[in-house]
Image: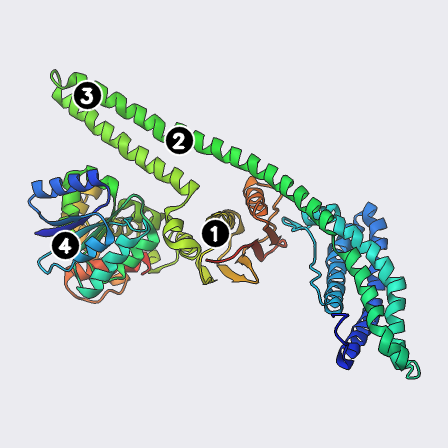
Amino acid sequence: MRVVLAEDQALLRAGLAQLLEAKGFEVAAAVDDLPSLEQALLDPTADAAVVDVRMPPTYADEGLRAAIAIRERRPGFPVLVLSQYVEHLYARELLASGEGAVGYLLKDRVGDVGEFVDALRRVAAGGTVLDPEVVASVIAKRKDSPVDRLTDREREVLALMAEGRGNAAIATTLVITEKAVAKHINAIFMKLDIPTDTDDHRRVRAVLAWLGV
Amino acid sequence: METRRPVTLAERLAVTGYAGLHLLLWVPLLTGFILLVTSGVLVVVWVGVVLLLALIPATRALANAHRKLAARILDAPVPPPYRPTSGGALTRLRMQAADPMTWRDLLWTLWALTFGFAISLIGVLLLALVVTIPIWWYGVVPLLQARASVDRALLTFGRTEALEQRVSVLSETRAEVVDYSAAEVRRIERDLHDGPQARLAALSLSLGLADDLFQSDPDAARKLVNEARGSASSALVELRDVVRGIHPPVLADRGLVGAVQALAIDMATPVEVDADLRGRPAAAVESAMYFAIAECLANTAKHSGATRVWIRIRHDGGVLRTWVGDDGRGGTDPTTGTGLRGVATRLAALDGGLRITSPVGGPTTVHLEVPCALS
C-alpha cells in the first residue's frame, strides 16, 4: 500500500516513515507543508494519506482542510488525520466529508505501534477510526439524540465501533461473546433506523448518527 | 455651525427647532431631577437604591439627548463620557456613583432647568412673537450656540480632565489585570507542577529502574517500560489540558466564531450560535471574548438547568458584542464566584465590560462587549 505522509516535525516524520516501512507500507511521499502535500496527493497511485492537522504555512488547520479537499476530489480516499489535540468539531467535519475511510487520532497513539498500524489498515479498508478521547467527550456530553434509546451496553459497543474496532476486538474488550456483540450491533442498527446495506457502511452510519453529524 | 459662513434660513429654523426640543425635554428633566433628589434621600431606607437603578440610566439618556442637540447646534462631536460599567445591578450602581460625570450631570440639570431653559425659551419666543423676527434673524444662532457651549462644557470633560479620567481608569484596570495575570501564572505553574512534571519524573524513574533490570530480569524491565509509556501519555494529556487553558488551539486555527462553535458542540444542552463577523478581532480581544463566553457556558451548564442556550456575536460601530442567553432558572450573582469577576477584569483591561440580566426564575442573558476593529 502506498501512503502519503505529511508531518512538519522532522523527527516525527522520519519516525513515522520508518515505522510504516517496517510494517510493510510503502511511503509514496513524506512532506512537511501544505503545498507539497497537495502536490503529493495528485499522485494517482497513492492509496492513503496520513496527515498532521497543523502545518506550515499558517500552522492552523490546513492538514484537516487538505484531507477534506482530497476526499471531495477523490471520494472515499482513505485519510488518517493526526493531531496534538482532538476537537469534536473537526471529527464531525471529517466524518461529514464522505462515508468511511477516515480516521482521526491523537499523535500520542503512534506510541502504540500495533494499534496505530491497525488503525491505518482499517481506515484504508474503508473503516472509521476515532480517537478514544473524542469518543469519551461525546459520551460525557451528548444527551439529546436518538442514542438515548440505546441501553448502556449498546452504547459501549457503539463507542468501540466509533474507535474502529471489529466485532472480535469489541468482544474481547467487553468480555462477552462475539455472538452477543453481533446481537447488540443489530439492536443498535434497528434503534437508530439505519437502512440495510453492507455491514461496513451501516457501522459508519451508526457512528455518524451518534456524533450527531 | 460655522459662524463665518453666512447662516441660511434653514439653519436658523433648525436651531429654533432644537430650542423647541429643549423646551419639550424640560418636563421629563424636571421630573427626573425631583425623583433623583428624592431617591438620593431614600437611599438610607433602600427604596432609594431601587429607584436609582432606573433613574440613573434615565437621566443619562436625557443628558445624552442634550449632548446630541448640542452637537447638532455646535456642529462638533459631544461624546457621552461615562465610564464603562460591568457586573450586577448593585455593582454598576456603585461604579456609576463613583463616576464624576454622574455628579456633573446633576449640576448640568440645575443649569438646564433654569438658565438653559430660559435661553431656549427666548429663542423660540423671538420667532413665535412675529414682531421680534428681526431680532430672531440675527440673535437666535449665537444665543443657542452659547447655551450649547455651556451644555458641552458641563456635559463633557475638558481635555486635561478627560486625560486624568482616562489615567485613573487605566491604572485601576491595569492593577486588576496585573493581579489577574499573576494569579493565572500561579495556576499554570501549579498545573504543570502537579501534572506533567510529576509524570515525567515518574517516567524517568521507571526508565532508570528498567535500565538496571534489563540483564537480570527482562520481564520486569518490560513492565517498567510499559509503565513509562503510560506516564508519557498521561503527561501529554495533562499538557493538552494546560495548553487549552492558556490558548485553545481551535481558537488559533479558526478564530472566535469557529472556536465558539467548537465550544457549543461540546455542551450537553443544545446551543444555537448566530455569529456575523467580517474579519478577526485582535488576538487579545479574541482570547478575552472566547474565555468570557466559555465561562458563561460553564456557568450555564453548572447552575442554570437550562434546556436551550443561544449565543449571538456581532461587530458594529467599532464594538464587538456578544450575548449569551439561556432559559434556565436565573438568579446569577456575579459577585459570588471568581469566574465572572475574572472575565470582567479581563474585559475591563480592553475597555470592555459585561452586564448580566438574571432575574430569579430566569431567563439569564450576559452581554459582553469590547471596542475593537476587525482585520
Identify residue for label 4.
Answer: A48
Give the distance between the C-alpha atoms of the residues marked 2 and 1, in whole angstroms.
28 Å
Assign the N terminus of chain B to one quadrant of the image: bottom right
Do the numbered discs 2 and 1 sit on residues whose CB atoms are within 8 Å? no
Distance from disc 2 to disc 4, alpha carbons, whole Å, reads: 38 Å
A207 left or right of B245? left
Q: Which element is circle 3 on?
A: helix
Residue B205 horizontal/vertical position (percent): 27, 21
Q: Amino acid at mark 4?
A: Ala
Q: Callout 1: helix, strand or loop? A: loop
Q: Are marks 1 and 3 on the same chain?
A: yes
What residue is at 19 percent from the left and 53 percent from the top?
Answer: A36
- Confirm or deny contact between disc 4 and disc 1 (CB under 8 A): no
Q: Quadrant of residue B36?
A: bottom right
Q: Earlier in the sequence, mark 3 or mark 2?
A: 2
> Is disc 4 placed on a helix, strand or loop?
strand
Q: Amino acid at mark 2?
A: Leu
Q: Which mark is residue B192?
A: 2
Q: Quadrant of residue A197?
A: bottom left
User: Percent from the top left, x then y, of residue B32?
Assistant: 82, 61
| Other residues around mark 4 within 10 Å, as few (<14) / some (14–19) / many (≥20) | many
The residue at which mark 3 appears reads as: B210
Q: Are marks 4 and 1 on the same chain?
A: no
Q: Which residue is painted at 16% across and 38% down in the image?
A: A15
3D distance between C-alphas at marks 4 and 3:
38 Å
- Mark 4 and mark 1: Cα distance apart in space: 39 Å
Q: Residue at x 52, y 33 (%)?
A: B182
**Circle 1 is placed at which residue position?**
B282
Question: Do we see residue A86 in this rendering?
Answer: yes
Depth order, front residue of B14/B195: B14
